[in-house]
Structures are given as C-alpha cells and as structure tokens.
Amino acid sequence: MRIPRFIQKACIILVLVFISAHTLDVSAWPGYRLRYKEQLYGLYHRHLTMYPEKYAENIYWLEQVLRSDFANPLNALALIEDKRAWEWYRNHFDLHINLLLTRLYLQWGKSYGREKVYFYNAPWKEQNLKSLEKAESLYAFSTVYWKEVLKNVEKIDAMDELFFSLSDIQHWEDEHLRIKLGTLDYQKIIARERRKNESFIAEFQAMDKNTY
C-alpha cells in the first residue's frame, strides 16, 4: 500500500524535527534503538487541536509500529505470563493500532472536506475540488485500515477466550467488544463521509460561469 506523496514529504520533515526536539528514554530497551512496536507506539501523541502536520506525524509513527516486531514479552505493555496471554496481547495491540489509523485518516480527510456547498463558492471551484479529492484519498486509506481492524477482530474471536482478559489493556479489549457488538462501526461512518464528499464534488463540477 503506497502512502500519498504529500503525506510522505510532510512525514519526513516532521520526523527530523520531532527527533531533534525530543529526548527519548529508551535506556530500558536492548540496543537503545527504536525497533520494537512498543517503543514506536510511545511516539504517538494525542493533540487537543489537530493540524495536517500532526495527523502526518502520528500516522507516520503508527505505520512504523505495524511494520516493526514486538518486543520481548518482558517489555510488553501488559503482564504476560503464558503463550495464551502473549497471543491475546499481540492481537489486541494490532487491532488498536489499526483502529487509531482508521480514525486518524478519517479525521484528516474530514479536515479537507466540507459540511455544505454554497453557490457563491463557485469562484474557488478548482481549489475546493482539489481539497475534496484529498479528502477522498484519505477516506480510502481509512477504509483500508478498517478492513485490517476487522481481520484483527476475527483473530481474537478465533481464540475463543470468552472469559480471558488482561487488565493492563482493558481499553483495547473494550474496543474489540464494541466492534464485535456493532456499537463501533467505522465502515458506516466512512461510507457516510464518502457519500457526502462525492455529492459535494458533483456539485462543484456542475458549477459554471452562470453559477455566480
């Protein structure tokens, strides 16, 4: 899966700035290198106000998380006592990361979208179309990661551990349960935003010199 070029450029710049401006406490990790999922996940930050560069920064780190290996169970984010717990932890970890990426791409797409189109927007038709096309490309990435979330849910369900739980990752387990019960369904949310975006694109494409 290729990341859009404008996202790649933003990520490279932000990563260089971010690394130079932060001192990471990795002394507890073998080799003092950022190489494991748990280390890289620590670079994900929630922001009160999100701007394009913040979305790009978080998405960059989370996608690096997915490409990396898990640390030794001793360095897991939950107490791991046996192989069953280890598999449970890894499946929920991946579900959580894919869910975060689903949400981030959706929110980033909405930042380029619109809530309504007015006839007097016609002079900026091309600018609006470019913005809406960016929104559509980001919604598409959100859909990709939601499909990965559903695969993670299937893996967890296949374990058939009805009464098993790890208290340290209970919020991840809650995410799995909500998705399974259908109370958390990004497929519907993404589909709604894409339909709305497509209708706005059609409205702008229909505008001509007589619109305004």
Image (cartoon, rainbow, N blue to C red):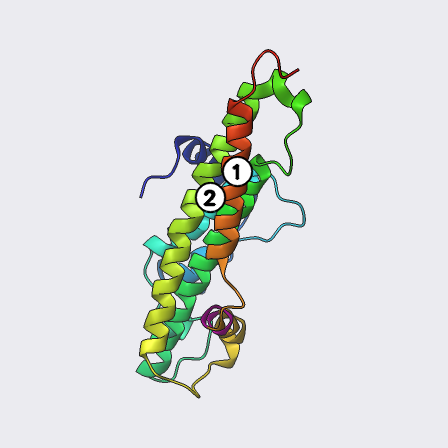
Residue 175 in the image, given as x and y percentages of width and height = 50, 69
Query: Does 103 sit left or right of 8 as displayed?
Result: right
Q: Which residues are magenta?
A: 176-180
Q: Nearer the viewer, residue 188 or 184?
A: 188
Assign a secondary structure to mark 1: helix
> Magenta region, mostly helix, strand or loop?
helix
Assign a secondary structure to mark 2: helix
Residue beneath the point at 41% across and 86% down? 162
Residue neighbourhood size for the residue with mark 1, other residues' Cα within 10 Å, grouped as few (<14), some (14–19), many (≥20): many
Q: Are marks 2 and 1 in contact (CB under 8 Å)?
A: yes
Calculate the distance from the C-alpha at mark 2 to the C-alpha at mark 1.
10 Å
Residue 149 in the image, given as x and y percentages of width and height = 40, 61
Q: Nearer the viewer, residue 86 or 35?
A: 86
Q: Amino acid at mark 2?
A: Tyr
Residue beneath the point at 44% across and 35% down? 7
Residue beneath the point at 54% across and 72% down? 171
Magenta highlight on residue 177: yes
Disc assigned to residue 169: none
Asked where in the image residue 153 lies, by quadrant, the reply is: bottom left
Q: Nearer the viewer, residue 189 or 151?
A: 189
Asked where in the image residue 12 lies, by quadrant, the reply is: top left
Q: Nearer the observer, disc 2 or disc 1?
A: 1
Residue beneath the point at 53% across and 45% down? 193
* Residue identifier under label 1: 197
Please count the marks in the image.
2
Residue neighbourhood size for the residue with mark 2, other residues' Cα within 10 Å, grouped as few (<14), some (14–19), many (≥20): many
Q: Amino acid at mark 1?
A: Asn
Q: Does the rendering let one see residue 32?
A: no
- Vertically, is 4 above or below 146? above
Mark nearer the N terminus (2 vs 1) = 2
- Look at the image and tell me in which quarter the C terminus lies: top right
* Residue identifier under label 2: 139
